Image (cartoon, rainbow, N blue to C red):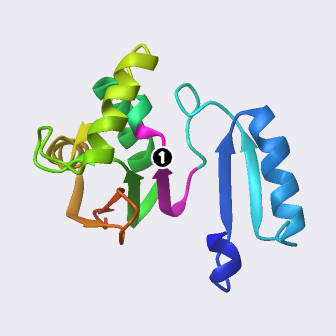
Amino acid sequence: LLTQKTPGLTSTVLDLPGVLKITNDIIRSYGLEERVKTVEGDYTRDAFPNANDVVLLAGMLHRETPETFKVLLKKAHDALLPGGMIILNDLFFENGNMDSPPFVNMFALTMLLTSSHGTIHSKTSAEKWLSETGFIQINSKPLPPPMPHLVITALKEKD
């Protein structure tokens, strides 16, 4: 857990009630009840908890349409304090097409075959949507091998 590794960090987890039952067990097992709180909700329907320094969207964006992806970026932007950071951690096509590591291409095919609208979005599209939402200083960095994920960060402008 990030909170366990970072002294002074507090976290809020927004997720569905069934998931939070497991999440709360994990939080208790690490003794982090005072620093990690949970909020029941559906990220596609509910607002994100507000006044955050950081919003992390991890391993979920590949399940969403471009329209929903953009809505989630707007919710994150609204939930951040001025100067706050958004962190996207997911699989992304690297060059706006299928010119990506084999696992990413195979995962994209799996999403196409097993979901109604899941896909892998391109890094270029994600960066464009972040900019259109009002984020600045957009950067991306791959996780170290063997992880195929890309981390994209951006900042909300200060007032």
Q: Residue at x 34, y 21 (%)?
A: 112
* Callout 1 amino acid: Gly
Q: Residue 74: x, y in percent?
A: 37, 40
Q: Residue 125: x, y in percent?
A: 17, 41
- Confirm whether the magenta stretch covers residue 78: no
Q: Residue 76 vs residue 98: left or right?
A: right
Which quadrant of the figure contains the C terminus?
A: bottom left
Element class at badge 1: loop
User: Which of 136/59 is in front?
Assistant: 59
Q: Which residue sits furthest top? A: 116
Q: Residue 35: x, y in percent?
A: 76, 70
Q: Residue 90: x, y in percent?
A: 39, 50
Q: Residue at x 22, y 41 (%)?
A: 129
- Segment tinted magenta in the rendering: 50-61
| Snapshot quadrant of residue 26 | bottom right
Q: Residue at x 67, y 69 (%)?
A: 1
Residue 16 lies, with reference to residue 150, above or below; the image says: above
The residue labelled by disc 1 is: 59
